[in-house]
Amino acid sequence: MKTLSYEQMQGLETPCMVVDMEQVQRNIRKMQEIADRRRCCLRPHIKTHKSTELARMQQEAGACGISCATVSEAEIMAAAGIEDIFIAYPLVGTHKLIRAEQLYRRVKRLILAVDSVEGAKALSRLAVSSKLILEVRLEIDTGAGRTGIPMAELKKTGQEIRGLEGLAVTGIYTFKSLIYRGQPTKDAGLAGAEEGAMMAEAAKLLREIGFAIREVSAGSTPTAEACAATGMVSEVRPGSYIYYDRMTYLEGACAAEEIAAAVYATVVSTPEPSMAVVDGGSKTFSGDVVLASPPFYFDSYAFLPDHPHLLLERMNEEHGILRSRQGPTGLSVGDVVAMIPLHICTAVNLQDHFYGVSENRIRQMPVDARGALV
């Protein structure tokens, strides 16, 4: 990440997010080339950037479509002209289903997600009442332990879903991240290879009981390349690769210079030599990653490239508490510091806009789908 000069920083109100748009272009090309080399479709997840302009850049580079987490994200992307959308999250609730049905009629392709018999039946009722055939993917739990049909229950659940009217189950998908043999791992190659093998097994089982599974979708930013290399998946869905962050760097998914986004914050208080307070707290940085937990034992919510001895170890709403590993912080009230978030996705959703930097020009750009939570 190239940090801004003192002169460039003077025009920015902090806290704010700054994005190196030239590096973004390189990151987009890098992941597209990985997918193309493996003859695998790339369907990037836009929940990282939530920007219609960046989604179009991904499409123009060769992405086959996009992934979204919510109906409202999908609506915003569709309004910007994106026509092939996968909502990679089980849709539950009448209002969401009605919005999905309306969106289905507006785009060329909308793929919906199911991980339960109850969810499938609700989609079936919607399809029948609307006289539609809804394209659906079944979510498989391959180790993340959140949504998804457990492998042990896949045959039973599949048999109950098979035959429901109005549903065309064309594929399966998963989010596994860095899990290997049920435990967190630092080895993305092992995690990705296992992910591909588990999804191939799931597809085989579902085909045996009558499903026409055409697409097998997997792969997050750290595992996408290894997963695609198995030849057992047809699509990968990484998201944070467009910016990368401190977490993906420590996971080995990128080099330090490939990180494209940073938050700039101003020092507002220096109550003691080894401590400084900045104007970016939990309303600016993501706190969703548990520090000091295996396998990486992250020690800070952000990394300061110009001050690597400092840790963002505690946050209140508008206060970011920086502590020095050793000695004084070296900061004074009024200093502006660049901070690379540990997790970029949720940090982006806290911004109304970001500043895109290209050829030394700075442009304010909207986070179009900020707060699109429904």
Image (tube, helix red, strand yellow):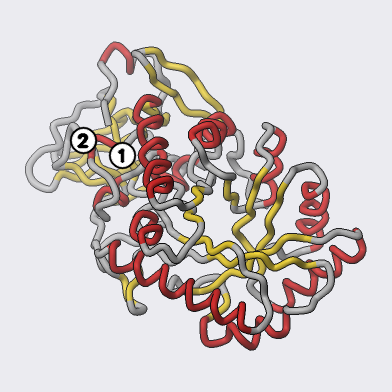
User: Could you tell me residue 147's position as x and y percent?
Assistant: 56, 70
Evaluate whether residue 282 shows in this view.
Answer: no
Q: Amino acid at mark 2?
A: Pro
Amino acid type, callout 1: Ile
Q: Is residue 321 left or right of residue 145?
A: left
Disc marking residue 340:
1
> In terms of image quadrants, where is residue 245?
top left
Residue under the point 31% across and 30% down: 268
Q: Quadrant of residue 213?
A: bottom right
Quarter of the image with the N terminus in it:
top left
Q: Please state the horizontal and vertical placement of residue 320, each as a whole percent of the image.
A: 34, 42
Q: Residue at x 72, y 34 (%)?
A: 79
Mark 1 surroundings: few (<14), some (14-19) or many (≥20) residues within 10 A: many
Residues tagged 1 and 2 counted as in contact (Cβ below 8 A): yes
Q: Is residue 12 visible?
A: yes
Mark 2 = which residue? Answer: 305
